[in-house]
Each structure stands twice: as structure tokens, then as C-alpha cells.
Image: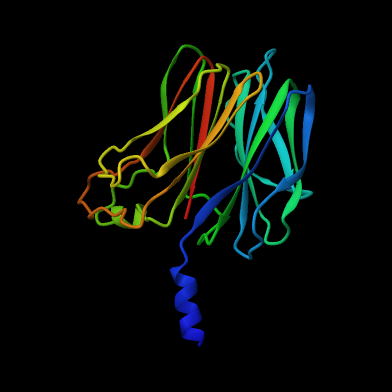
Amino acid sequence: MWLAQHVLQKAKRPYAVLTHTDWTVTNLTTYTFNNVKIGRPDPSRLIVVAIHGEDSAASFNLNSGTIGGDASDIILTGAVNLTINTGLMQLAVPVGEELTVTGTYSEATSGCMIGVYAIYNLKSHTPRKTAEAQRSSGSGVMQINTLGTDTTPGMQEAFCSPDAICIAAASNVGVDAPTWGRNSGTIPVPDGDSFIVPQYEMNHDFMACGALLQYPNNFKISPASTVPQSFSMQFTGSALSDLVGARWE
């Protein structure tokens, strides 16, 4: 019996679910979102919050946040030299179905939006990779390397594990609908782009959006001698943009 349960537990793949979105355009330094839905309770559950802010007057930064009243781990604080900011914060929350999320900025801002994910069955809650990109003017494509690169012979296949979750979030001063895509680098990707899935899009004075990527079961490449392997998520939007992303396994 123990062996069967152990094998079953090992067979569980990580997966992520968007559980909640919310927004406000009130001028505040600390934003509080109540009754935030966080999905099914589970001992393995990790809550990840993408938090988007805008201040038309000056650049600013995400200083801290809480999830369920406990201090969250800030993964990325996003741009520090733009009037928009996109951050990612996380906390292990094994129990409960709703809680309160707060985010505190370095100064009063004009609006804030959140996208909340529950991730299950990870081997580790520590992100394997984080990345960010900013654009201060104009329009076009930005990309972040969510997979990373590895030039160690024979290590690429393990590095490209299908048991990976990537979450990307972007803030955009423009109001055009954003697009998500990929730049596969040297990795052959099966099934086209179907596993990059937009998760939310909110437009309240500025644009906030998020996307989720999970590699399919058949995502595997053969180890190569010293060829770097990479995978990027691309975001296309207009005007000021701030893009962040992280990968967990």
C-alpha cells in the first residue's frame, strides 16, 4: 500500500490555476484586497500574486506585501524607473479558500490590480528562474527567458523538465489588447504555442495582464554537447511596459 501511494504521489505533475483577479483605481500607498479566492486547499499549495501598479506622476517600487496576513516573499519588484510597476510575490498557504492580500508601494499610486494563482505539486517553492524586461517608450516586442540556458554537456534535458510552471505578468500604459507568444531559441517545441495560455486582462486606466505556461508531457529535448538551450515568453504592447516572469518546478 505504501509503495502504491508513493508512486502515485511521485506521478503528480505540478499545475497552476488562476483563482482571482481584482482592481482599484483609488490613490493609496497600501492596497488591500479582501475575500481573495485561492483555490483548493492542499499541503503543496503555493499562492503567487501578480501585482500591477501605476502612478502617472513618478517612478515607484513595490516595497512589501502580505498574503493572508503573513509577510509574502517578493520574487520580483519590477521596474523602478517607470510610472508602472509589475511585481510577483508568493507564500505557501496549505489551508483555507479565501484570504486578504495587501501590497505596499514606495509612495502613493493611482491604481493597483492583482492576478492570483494557486500552484500545486511543486518539488520546490523556490523559483528556478526569474526574469524581467521594461520599455520606456514606443511599442513592440519584449521577451523574458523563462526557461534559462544551460551549456553543461548532457544537462539540457533535465533543465527543460516538463514539470515546470511559468507565470508571466505585464503592465502597460497603453490600452491596446496585448499579445503573448514565444521565441523558442534552440528548443523544438511541440504543439505550437498552445501551451502559452493568457489568463487575465484588465484595463482600468492602464493595462494589466498575465499568462501561464506549462510544458506538455512530451516536452523533451535530447542532450546536446555545449549548445545553449533557451525558451522565451514574448509580450507585445504599446507605450510604457513592464514585464516579469518566474519559473517553478
Q: Is residue 140 left or right of residue 168?
A: left
Q: Nearer the viewer, residue 137 or 34?
A: 34
Residue reaching furthest to the left: 225
Residue reaching furthest to the bottom: 1
Q: Residue 61 sits in which quadrant?
A: top right
Q: Is residue 184 left or right of residue 62?
A: left
Residue at horizontal 61%, vertical 58%? 45
Residue at horizontal 38%, vertical 43%? 148
Q: Is residue 121 above or below residue 186?
A: below
Place of residue 129 in the rendered image (x, y in percent of width and height, measured from the top left): 47, 45
Place of residue 199 in the rendered image (x, y in percent of width and height, measured from the top left): 53, 39
Q: Is residue 4 above or below residue 140?
A: below
Q: Is residue 68 left or right of residue 132?
A: right
Q: Is residue 239 left or right of residue 184?
A: right
Residue at horizontal 25%, vertical 41%? 186
Q: Residue 36 sits in which quadrant?
A: top right
Q: Nearer the viewer, residue 137 or 202?
A: 202
Place of residue 143 in the rendered image (x, y in percent of width and height, measured from the top left): 41, 30
Q: Residue 22 sits in which quadrant?
A: top right
